[in-house]
Image (cartoon, coloured by chain):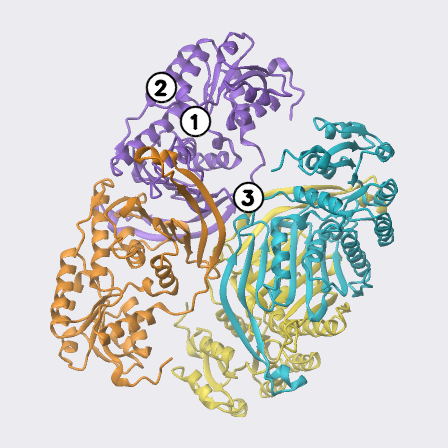
Chain colours: A purple, B orange, C yellow, D cyan
Amino acid sequence: MTGSRDDRDRLRVAVVGCGYWGKNLARNFATSPYSMLTWAVDADEERAERVARGTGATVAAHVERVLDDQSVDAVAIATPAHTHLDIAMAALLAGKHVLVEKPIASSVEDGIAMVRAAAAAGLTLMVDHTFCYTPAVQKIRDVVREGVLGDLLFVDSVRINLGLVQPDVDVLWDLAPHDLSILDYVLPDGFKPLAVAAHGADPIGAGKACVAYLTLTLPHGSIAHAHVNWLSPTKVRTTIIGGSKRTLIWDDLNPSQRLCIYDRGVDLEYDPTQIAAEARTAAMVSYRSGDMIAPALPEREALGEVIREFAASVREGRPPATDGQAGLRVLDLLDAASRSMAFHGATVPLRGLR
Amino acid sequence: MTGSRDDRDRLRVAVVGCGYWGKNLARNFATSPYSMLTWAVDADEERAERVARGTGATVAAHVERVLDDQSVDAVAIATPAHTHLDIAMAALLAGKHVLVEKPIASSVEDGIAMVRAAAAAGLTLMVDHTFCYTPAVQKIRDVVREGVLGDLLFVDSVRINLGLVQPDVDVLWDLAPHDLSILDYVLPDGFKPLAVAAHGADPIGAGKACVAYLTLTLPHGSIAHAHVNWLSPTKVRTTIIGGSKRTLIWDDLNPSQRLCIYDRGVDLEYDPTQIAAEARTAAMVSYRSGDMIAPALPEREALGEVIREFAASVREGRPPATDGQAGLRVLDLLDAASRSMAFHGATVPLRGLR
Amino acid sequence: MTGSRDDRDRLRVAVVGCGYWGKNLARNFATSPYSMLTWAVDADEERAERVARGTGATVAAHVERVLDDQSVDAVAIATPAHTHLDIAMAALLAGKHVLVEKPIASSVEDGIAMVRAAAAAGLTLMVDHTFCYTPAVQKIRDVVREGVLGDLLFVDSVRINLGLVQPDVDVLWDLAPHDLSILDYVLPDGFKPLAVAAHGADPIGAGKACVAYLTLTLPHGSIAHAHVNWLSPTKVRTTIIGGSKRTLIWDDLNPSQRLCIYDRGVDLEYDPTQIAAEARTAAMVSYRSGDMIAPALPEREALGEVIREFAASVREGRPPATDGQAGLRVLDLLDAASRSMAFHGATVPLRGLR
Amino acid sequence: MTGSRDDRDRLRVAVVGCGYWGKNLARNFATSPYSMLTWAVDADEERAERVARGTGATVAAHVERVLDDQSVDAVAIATPAHTHLDIAMAALLAGKHVLVEKPIASSVEDGIAMVRAAAAAGLTLMVDHTFCYTPAVQKIRDVVREGVLGDLLFVDSVRINLGLVQPDVDVLWDLAPHDLSILDYVLPDGFKPLAVAAHGADPIGAGKACVAYLTLTLPHGSIAHAHVNWLSPTKVRTTIIGGSKRTLIWDDLNPSQRLCIYDRGVDLEYDPTQIAAEARTAAMVSYRSGDMIAPALPEREALGEVIREFAASVREGRPPATDGQAGLRVLDLLDAASRSMAFHGATVPLRGLR
């Protein structure tokens, strides 16, 4: 793209944590026209070195050295969730902007502390909800928010495959963050979940849920639901967003037709001479059957867009599209879902974080 | 087939209720080698006449005339659910075997009364769970019960489409009976649901749930789940039955490959030197990736098989495959699901009907 | 629809030949608001009686009785192809309009005679190219002729399945008439095939081709191709119509998305300063990637439309959409294809029938 | 795998031509346990340097320097086809084994010269028919050759997409080598094509065929056919191999079910009391409908297998699986297809190369 961008305009970034995802982040920071990789940090210095190779970045075993470096603009944190709080707070105190992996923290309280600290310091705190930066989700957000679908009726998401049974988290915390962060991103402002219920099962005796179902109560009688599963022999990645005017289906495994917008649905026509209670039963039900459109989507790597947004939000002093608040909202849903699951799927009303 | 079957061997049947399904039943009773249609009964006699035409059956507006006819062996009831009790009890009292549409009755108490009355009279009471008699479900039952899948881990069923919003029942009572009767039929004896939770939504203001999710707690940590939905622009009819050895996927809309049995899955290998609590975390997780087999299925009409089974159970004096108990179990699940839905998805433990 | 249509407005039709397709035709003539079935003719009178039952039609073993009946408006011929000439000529001489099954005759010469006779008598001669009256093909014709696709580049059709090996015809004459009649119907006027080549194989020793490939040379460098096959274990019914602006794909086995119109393609941009020969190589190739639209199609039975068109063409004294000329063009292509197949796929230039 | 393989056992390879495919080859030679990359050669030395970086290979602008290096075992040629002859002959004269990109040469005569030279020198000449080394094609070869399908009846291949219009070759030479090399690889010994016909079209005025159909006459009445196309908006990669016992379908774009083996088909049963001519028409046709099996396939990169086979054939002094003869056979088919296309699809009998 704009490979000729002046180096002084680029965000100077330190990546902390050089595991699977940290390596990806580092590579993208190193090659993005919007950033430079200046430090690669990992307690395992060999790992950090492998990541730094050929990028010009310096290697460190501890984040302290990075925080002392006045030339570093931002810290990207790709360490385990329970370490996010300490690293992020230190970085913010040192005046660095922060990009943090999801979930933003291992408890809602920690997350709140991070968000407040960033606000107080006037620094950017962004959560890496990568999926929100894919062309498909960007398009879905536009479609939903521009009212193409009409009022939202239901969201149904299926994310199942023969998955790696994770050592530290259950299937809910492994897979549902994708669905929840996408939902948070595309739902209109103010149209946020009111309550959560979750049912899980561990039929193979893995010591944690391997199959889970998540139900979100949305405003105006709407509902959202997600099925996450590590035990399915076939892979499914499908989300249906039903609206009063149109319905969108996203099949992420169908590259030639990822999004379909159906102009089909059920219409209720109320008799205006009827009053309240009777109106419902007097409603005429009719069915629409119109065209389907599969919009063309650009080919773009999501992580490149994450970095572009991070750099832009820092430069422009504005909150990023997936800011700390978004991270908190997702964390709050996960936390409530876990509590629901422990209580046989009891519906847990949400407080509504501010 | 055995078109030359002697008329004296055939079950002489009266069909009561000549609406959409009654007409189907009547046509099948009239043409089956195992039965004859002798009466067509409907309060709307014209409707009854249309059904009787060309079959040799006599028409009646009321069931009383049928019950007086000593030559009638059995009554098939295809009237609305709230009328099942009265008609079935009268038929049983008159010494007629009974085939009744699902749901068996409109309340669990009514259903119990019918089951007890049939038992007392030594007559057959069969519920028309038609889907159980399709070649696909027959094969699934065999596969599950012969242990081809190993231990059952989870069942996930999706039955969604742009459906007719029914005037009298919600989406749960309209569509879930199919999933529940199939589940009841294929699950091994003794492996029955322990509890139910259901979440529903009426986002279009139809006055009843148009989208619903049903979660069943099964023994040994297993789970079953069904998604039923009238608002989806595309039709889906898929059931996954995950087992410890193999997993079966039934896609009823894929005629060339309705059933697939995958030899893929997650294996846990416990270290026998470890004890209890630690054993779990010490378990080695491994993944199998074997062949998939799509078994050939015969082409057979389910309703013909329903009648064959009804006639055989009468002839042999044995309970039919989908007897009154099966009908009661399905009704009990539906009833518990409705109660759960009214209480925000609270998990409702089942009593276990006997 | 217009069930109240006055009987005097309805076309009075005799169906000759009461086999599989004749039965279908008869049923449709009997129930269409545009026609009445007045005779059912078959050498096997029992077969004719089964077809006539309940329709009010008279039964005959020979067509002569029908031709003497002044009240008969039209004769629909569903007998084997080699009998079409005699029956059609007699019917036309007796002043009856004619609807004839495909192929119109068993030789081009016979077909020409029929077309000339109908023209001389001022009577309608229509060929039952049923597929042309499906909602999908109607839509394709509109799309092609309104220029939505731009210039036609290629047509590729696949019609394969585990088919009944026919006793009297090879796979070309069994299946390709569908593709050829559809092609004839949708191609713009004047844009007709120039030459035909066909390759066949009889690998199972059935005594006739069971697999065949048909290549049509179209004007302006375009090409059409059809694959017909009785030996495929899976069924495929797909046609791609590639255009300079858009490309249409028709998958007849995908009811939820039968037609897809892709706004994708290859563009050549010529440098106007270059002359002739060099211009080509200097052309800039570019690629378009736009939306896909799957238009909604009405649910309508094709045979009902065939009858509506037949009745309308008689009433209005105009050629039907699939007139004798269309039947001749298809027959000419089949005949040329058979000759090509006998000569190792030699390209057979067409004469162009008038 | 066996990363600890002793360096002295590894094949020392020079890659000549560092374009798109040469880069791939070089990377694989450098990382394979069976080889080392010792030279990267390209007239554009910068390109060679990029390829050599980090591999320890020396860079050269001309192949002469490589040929003088006694330590080089083999030369891999990834330059344009018209240069293959000169480079390969020089390499063979210098005692180097040769791996050459497809097509083996730009004329059959050149190819023959290369094959003879390698034979005379007792050196390995392998053609890089990469697709033959994919797990899918390996499995297909086994299935075909072990008789799982019975006698081969037909092969139908479709390889279409919105393709890059190539500057130097038409769609036949761009895409059909894949189908032809795969066919050559999987067909049983002795069961080789007897004749070729090809039809092409250039409807966009690109100066070369953009759509082509290729028909191969196989022994015993069998047929093979390929459709290659640069103008299709959707991508298809499907091959059907029909056999007398079973039929295999390979859909390379369906990763979860790449191969399906159907136990379905048409059977002819001859009446043994009938003789020759009559037997055919007296044959009873019957239809089998059995299970479908989708065999599990390993995940393996094809290019790694190419190198393993090249190294093994050198080490063991045996012809590689895709030797010069295979390359010649494919070239001969392409050449005959081009001649056929220039003569309106005339069937070109093959000489049968030895």
Farthest-out residue, front: B273
**What residue would you read off at disc 2?**
A110
Name the quarter where the N terminus of chain A is drawn: top right
Callout 3–callout 2 Cβ contact below 8 Å: no
**Hey, what amino acid is under mark 3?**
Pro
Identify the residue at horizontal 52%, vertical 74% (top origin).
C311
Q: Please state the chain letter of the residue tagged with numbered disc 1 in the rendered image.
A: A
Element type at mark 2: helix
- The residue under label 2 is which amino acid type? Asp
Q: Position of residue B118 (x, y in %)?
A: 15, 68
Q: Which residue is mark 1?
A: A102
Query: In the figure, is residue D317 to the left or right of B66?
Result: right
- In the displayed structure image, the side of residue B339 where residue B143 appears, left or right: right
Report x, y in % for residue B182.
31, 58
For the point 25% across and 81% down, the residue is B57
Q: Are marks 1 and 3 on the same chain?
A: yes
Q: Which residue is mark 3?
A: A255
Q: Chain of mark 3?
A: A
The residue closer to the viewer here, C323 or D25, is D25
